[in-house]
Image (tube, rainbow, N blue to C red):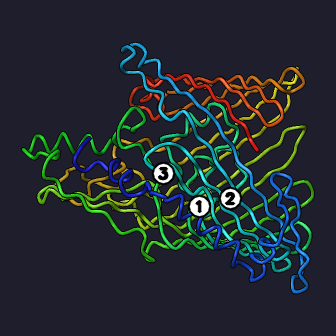
């Protein structure tokens, strides 16, 4: 990788190590001390519930209300093999972590709830906090604080309004192969979230995030993304000028855990007739980094551009189609389009639907597109000038179609599903068929993924990553 490539930086700075003993200790203290009387009740309780959330009570005169404690989770075994590795011989075949799972704890009364969800896998960081938060109930007002994953907007798969949590892009395709939900690739963020319900179907939400984290990318290996187009041009120009960017190149990054990188948003949703309508405003940072280069000093600086987003969304049922749409305007500081180190303002939209067709076949289709505004205003592409455009060489529009077709058999215990992602401008695609058997709390899935198209495309760059995946999971 190049000296100023950001991929290694993201991995080194945003993969956190979690001590399991500390997490369980904190949860134990939370149960003993949270709410004043919760710990006393739990110590005197005779039993506690798991999935059925059996109510725990203790005959203590000073205690009012009931505490409900639940524990649930999933244990799974997954084997992922890459066809390209099999061609190289057995010495190159690696299946990675065979075990993964999760466990969640919840304690709740009529006025408060505490939740901890952990992700488990035998790797360098065997325990990761999936979510951990405390929620208080005050009539129509709910306030929660902690590590949280929130979904805003109506789109099924990462619409333009779903911007609170960044994603781990190194796992997105293997996760998509046999899962309907992609919540697993979202990164929980520390936040304070409040929601207030009024009338019958209306709600207003606000969120505050005290710091910032960008999208995670694989730093190396088969899922490491290609460098952006501007980086190739910089390398070519630097080489012609006699500069070696692979050695002695100084890279600096901002401290994104400071309050200067705080983000906030406001969202309103309501129902009118059979239609759900939403509107939101968000101030934050673009999760894709910009970069400012000083070739003479052999230095580069990462920039996470601030921006404002104004968006609306809409969902309804029409002629049997469940329709969803979103529209967003992303306003950056480059209002003239002539600052090459800042991403241009853009528009983004998505439109999707799902419907049951003939013979029990279901289809879910979504189109996402972003449109860059004020394109071509940066006059120079010379790396000696500070106006070098980081969006040079990138398409003005980015359009992606995601479709999932599924059919169930044997009284809905066996499902055949195929997910297809198609990049219009890059002329590339990913196809991920899966056969999934579900019985009670057990799940067995066999899936695979194929990539095709231009090797410079966002999907086509992974065309050597054809994989087979076998998963067996048990939920409790």
Q: Give me the residue at 54% from left, 33% from top.
A: 98
Q: In the structure shown, which secondary structural element does the residue marked by tag 1 occupy?
A: loop
Q: Which mark is residue 372?
A: 3
Q: For mark 2, what is the residue?
A: 152
- The location of residue 14, given as percent across then percent down, is 42, 57
Is there CB contact under 8 Å for labels 2 and 1? yes
Q: In the structure shown, which secondary structural element does the residue marked by tag 3 occupy?
A: strand
261 vs 393, nearest the viewer: 261
Task: Classify 128 as above or below 366.
Answer: below
Residue 398 horizontal side relative to residue 351, left or right: left
Q: Nearer the viewer, mark 2 or mark 3?
A: 2
**Mark toward the start of the polypeptide (2 vs 3):** 2
How far separated are the C-alphas under marks 2 and 3? 22 Å
Residue 65 horizontal side relative to residue 364, left or right: right
Residue 377 horizontal side relative to residue 98, left or right: left
**Mark toward the start of the polypeptide (2 vs 1):** 2
62 vs 182, nearest the viewer: 62
Q: How many labels does the image show?
A: 3
How far separated are the C-alphas under marks 2 and 1? 8 Å
- The location of residue 279, given as percent across then percent down, is 71, 64
- Quadrant of the drawing holding the C terminus: top right
Q: Give me the residue at 55% from left, 35% from top.
A: 173
Q: In which quarter of the image is residue 266?
A: bottom right
Q: In the structure shown, which secondary structural element does the residue marked by tag 2 occupy?
A: loop
**In the current view of this chain or complex, which residue is farthest to the left?**
242
Q: Which mark is residue 164?
A: 1
221 vs 30, nearest the viewer: 30
Q: How many residues crowd around disc 2 within 10 Å: few (fewer than 14), some, or many (20 or more)?
A: some
Q: Give me the residue at 45% from left, 67% from top.
A: 306
Q: Nearer the viewer, mark 1 or mark 3?
A: 1
């Amino acid at each position: 990788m190049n000296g100023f490539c950001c991929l290694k930086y993201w991995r080194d700075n945003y993969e956190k190590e979690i001590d399991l003993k500390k997490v369980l200790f904190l949860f134990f203290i939370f149960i003993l001390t949270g709410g004043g009387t919760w710990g006393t009740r739990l110590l005197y309780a005779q039993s506690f519930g798991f999935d059925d959330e059996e109510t725990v009570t203790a005959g203590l005169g000073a205690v009012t209300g009931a505490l409900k404690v639940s524990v649930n989770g999933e244990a799974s075994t997954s084997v992922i093999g890459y066809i390209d590795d099999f061609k190289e011989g057995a010495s190159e075949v690696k299946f990675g972590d065979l075990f993964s799972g999760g466990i969640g704890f919840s304690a709740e009364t009529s006025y408060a709830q505490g939740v901890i969800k952990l992700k488990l896998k035998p790797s360098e960081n065997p325990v990761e906090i999936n979510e951990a938060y405390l929620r208080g109930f005050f009539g129509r007002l709910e306030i929660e604080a902690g590590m949280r994953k929130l979904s805003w907007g109506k789109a099924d798969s990462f619409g333009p309004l779903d911007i609170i949590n960044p994603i781990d892009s190194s796992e997105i395709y293997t996760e998509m192969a046999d899962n309907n939900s992609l919540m697993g690739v979202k990164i929980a963020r520390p936040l304070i979230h409040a929601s207030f319900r009024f009338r019958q179907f209306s709600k207003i939400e606000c969120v505050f995030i005290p710091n910032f984290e960008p999208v995670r990318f694989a730093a190396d290996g088969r899922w490491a993304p290609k460098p952006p187009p501007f980086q190739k041009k910089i390398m070519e120009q630097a080489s012609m000028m006699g500069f070696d960017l692979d050695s002695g190149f100084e890279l600096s990054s901002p401290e994104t855990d400071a309050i200067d990188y705080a983000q906030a948003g406001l969202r309103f949703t309501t129902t009118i007739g059979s239609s759900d309508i939403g509107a939101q405003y968000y101030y934050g940072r673009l999760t894709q980094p910009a970069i400012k280069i000083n070739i003479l000093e052999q230095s580069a600086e990462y920039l996470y551009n601030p921006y404002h987003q104004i968006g609306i969304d809409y969902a309804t049922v029409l002629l049997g189609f469940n329709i969803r749409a979103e529209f967003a305007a992303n306003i950056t500081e480059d209002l003239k389009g002539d600052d090459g180190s800042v991403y241009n303002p853009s528009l983004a939209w998505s439109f999707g639907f799902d419907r049951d067709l003939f013979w029990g076949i279901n289809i879910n289709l979504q189109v996402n597109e972003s449109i860059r505004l004020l394109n071509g205003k940066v006059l120079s592409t010379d790396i000696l000038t500070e106006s070098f455009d980081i969006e040079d060489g990138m398409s003005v529009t980015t359009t992606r179609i995601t479709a999932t077709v599924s059919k169930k058999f044997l009284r809905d215990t066996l499902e055949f599903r195929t997910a297809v992602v198609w990049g219009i401008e890059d002329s590339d695609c990913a196809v991920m068929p899966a056969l999934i058997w579900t019985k009670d709390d057990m799940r067995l899935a066999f899936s695979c993924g194929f990539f095709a198209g231009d090797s410079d495309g966002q999907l086509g760059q992974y065309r050597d990553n054809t994989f087979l995946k076998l998963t067996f999971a048990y939920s409790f």
